[in-house]
Amino acid sequence: MIENFFNWINDRHEIYLHRVRKLNPPWTEDPIFNQYKFTNPFRENDRVTIWMRDNWTNPNHNKPHGQIIFNCCLFRMVGTTEFANQHGWVDKFNPTYTKEVIEDRLKNKLRTFTGAYIITNQGIKKPKSEVVVDSFLTPIWEEQEALAKVAEETQSLQKLHMAMGNYLGWGGGGFMSYEVITDLNYTPVLDKAKDRFSWANAGPGAKRGLNRIFGRELTKSIKQEKANEEMKDLLSKKHTYLKPHVPVKDVDMRTIEHSLCEFDKYQRILNKEGTPRSRYNPYLDGLKHIPIGGVQ
């Protein structure tokens, strides 16, 4: 199962390389990869993240660290390049303007919130725009310097993730804060993080993937500490199982965690346990190659 896991990374990254070289599809003979959508092992190669680097974080790399933190939160909490392109980077936060942009886009049935994950109202009975802006984003804006101080003093993904978890909309399982932490790892805020290769926040899919690999019941509960140790164990085997076309030096804990979730999805299809909602579309849509596992 460990070899199968790393072969998922090998095969999925090979598909990516075929795509960026503009070879004609199909890019694999694997019927599951040809039929269903799987994200890249390297999150930095996903289309939305590429746009974010090119148009959001890289052009603003010299801004105050608190401001970078907030803008990464804004980008991921809404989650679409269409919204971000209209709204623009925030130097001075105007909650009314942000709500107006969201509400106007929703009113005109324009793509606004991402479909990749679900932003809930956390039980607050108000319009989504108000919950996201007033309850989730405004506190981050107000506390941006305190969060930047945590990042500066610790240079730890885990420590900043824990600090963000204290704010409404960013705690719980820590999915949203983990997305932002990963973004910050490729900005001056956390580009020197000391725990990039020793910590990741395992989500439900990653834990199911670990259960598969280590022969447990798929629904067995795993504490974060155990999941982290098992992910570190997998990471230590990357030189053994990864093929030459995969940049081994860029395979970090986020790569392992992210791939575990997608590997679990692949195994569900293989074992006829269910099928994902997203079908695969081989259309390139402007895909381009960037430094894998990092940005310049």
Image (tube, rainbow, N blue to C red):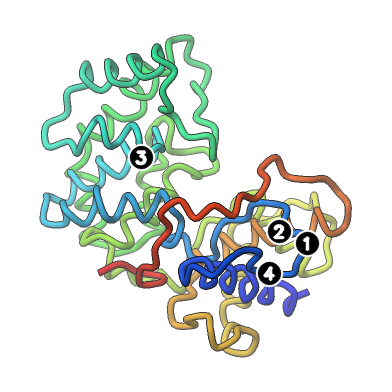
- Quick check: marks 3 and 1 in contact, CB under 8 Å? no
Question: Are circles 2 and 4 on residues that touch, CB within 8 Å?
Answer: yes
Q: Secondary structure at mark 3?
A: helix
Residue 31 sits in which quadrant?
bottom right
Q: Is residue 31 depicted above or below 197 in this figure?
A: above
Q: What residue lies at 49% left-to-right and 82% top-to-bottom?
A: 248
Asked whether, in this view, residue 126 is left or right of residue 194, the answer is right
- Left or right of 123: which side holds 101? left
Task: Check residue 81 in the rendering and tell me which mark sits there, or answer none.
Answer: 3
Task: State the SS at label 1.
Answer: helix
Hey, what amino acid is under mark 1? Pro
Where does residue 250 sit, x and y in percent of width and height?
A: 43, 76
Which residue is labeled 4 in the image? Answer: 28
Q: Residues within 10 Å of mark 2 (few under 14, many from 20)?
A: some
Residue farthest front in this picture? 24
Q: Position of residue 211 (x, y in %)?
A: 76, 61
Q: Position of residue 262 (x, y in %)?
A: 65, 57
Q: Residue at x 25, y 41 (%)?
A: 71
* Residues at discs 1 and 4 in contact (Cβ within 8 Å): no
Q: Is residue 201 visible?
A: yes
The residue identified by callout 1 is 31
